[in-house]
Amino acid sequence: MIRNILTGAAMGIAEVIPGVSGGTIAFVGGIYERLLNAIKSLSPKLLTTFKSEGFDGVWKAIDGLFLVQLFFGMGLGIGVGIFGVTYILDNYPLLLWSFFFGLILASCYYIGNKIENWNIKNGLLLILGAVFAFGVTTMTPSGGTSNLLFVYLSGVIAISALMLPGLSGSFILLILGMYSVIIPAVKETLKMNFDFLPLTAVFCAGCLTGVILFSNLISWTYKNYPNATLAVLTGFMLGSLNKIWPWQSVLSVKEKDGEFIPELTKSVSPSTFSQLTENIQFFGTDPKLLACIVLMVLGAGLVLILHFTEKSNKTTS
C-alpha cells in the first residue's frame, strides 16, 4: 500500500515538471503494466460485471484498491509539485534537472534491460522512438487559450503522455501553449478559488477520456509485442534526455505575469553555459558542475539500486 502511494506521489510530482514523465516513474516503480490493465478495465463491460457480480465484482475488475492508493498518491504529488517543486524549479533549475537526468538515464538501462530479444527490428524501433521524442522536445511552444474545447483536447493529449515513459504530459501542455493556462487554474482551484473550477473540470474530463483510450492501445501492444513496445519506450526516454539536460541556452523568451521567462532553450556544454551572458537573468552562468554531477549520480543510483534489488530477488526466488 505504502509503495503504491509513494509511487503515485512521485508520478504526480513528475507530471508537474515539464520534461519529466510520470510513465517513467510508473515503470521504475514496477506498476506500469498493472496500471495499464487497471485503467483498461474502465470500460462499458463494467455494466455487465455489475449486473452479474455487483459492486464487489466491479471493484475487483478495476483493481480498485490499487487505483485508489495510486491516485491518492498522485493527488498529493501534484499538490507538492505545484506548490513545492515548482519553487525548486524556479530557484535551483540546474540541480533539479541534474537529478532527473540521472534518474531517467538510468531508467533507459532499466527498461532496455527488460527486452529479451535484441535484434535489428527492435534496434530500429528504439532509434525511431528516440528521434520522435527528440523532435517533440525541440518543438516551439504555441500560444494558449481558455477555450474549453481546446482545454478538453489538451487533457486528452497530455494525459496520453502519462502512459509513455520519456514523454512528459506537462511538456506536451507547454508545446500546446496550455501549461501557463492549466497549471495556474489547477493551483487556484486547489486554493478553493472556484472561478477556475469549470476549466479544471473540463481538463480533468479530457484526461479521463485520454487515459482510458490510450491505456487500451498501449496494453494491447505491450501484451502482443512486448519487446518492440519496450524498445520504443526506451527510445522515447533516450530522446527526451535533451529536454532535461541541465545546461540550457535561452533562445527565446515570453512574458508571463509581467515577467519574462524562457520559452525555447537549447542544450549546451557546461563550459559553453558559463559564457552565456544572456542566461544570467534566468539560470545564471555558474554551471554548478560538481553539485550537478553528484545529483545525477544520486538520481541514477536510486534506479540502479531498485534494478539490482529486483534482479537479486528474482535470482533467490
Image (tube, grey):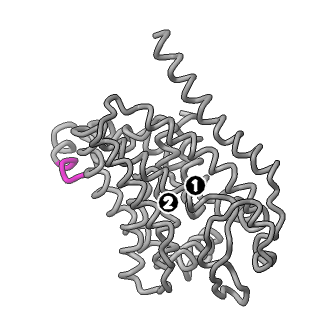
- The crowding category of the residue bearing disc 1, from other C-alpha atoms within 10 Å (few below 14, some 14 to 19, many at least 20), is many
The residue positioned 67% from the left and 56% from the top of the image is: 97
Which quadrant would residue 243 be assigned to in this image?
A: bottom right
Dot 1 corresponds to which residue? Answer: 14
**Percent position of residue 229, x then y:** 32, 44
Q: What stretch is highlighted in magenta?
A: 43-47
Label 1, label 2: how far apart the Cα atoms are = 8 Å
Which residue is most to the top?
316
**Percent position of residue 44, x then y:** 19, 53
Report the amino acid beneath label 2.
Answer: Ser
**Percent position of residue 270, x then y:** 74, 60
Dot 2 corresponds to which residue? Answer: 168
Report the amino acid beneath label 1.
Answer: Ala
Residue 205 can be seen in this image: no
* Residue 151 vertical placement versus 237 (above, below): below
* Residue 36 vertical placement versus 110 (above, below): below
- Circle 2: element type: loop
Which quadrant would residue 81 be assigned to in this image?
A: bottom right
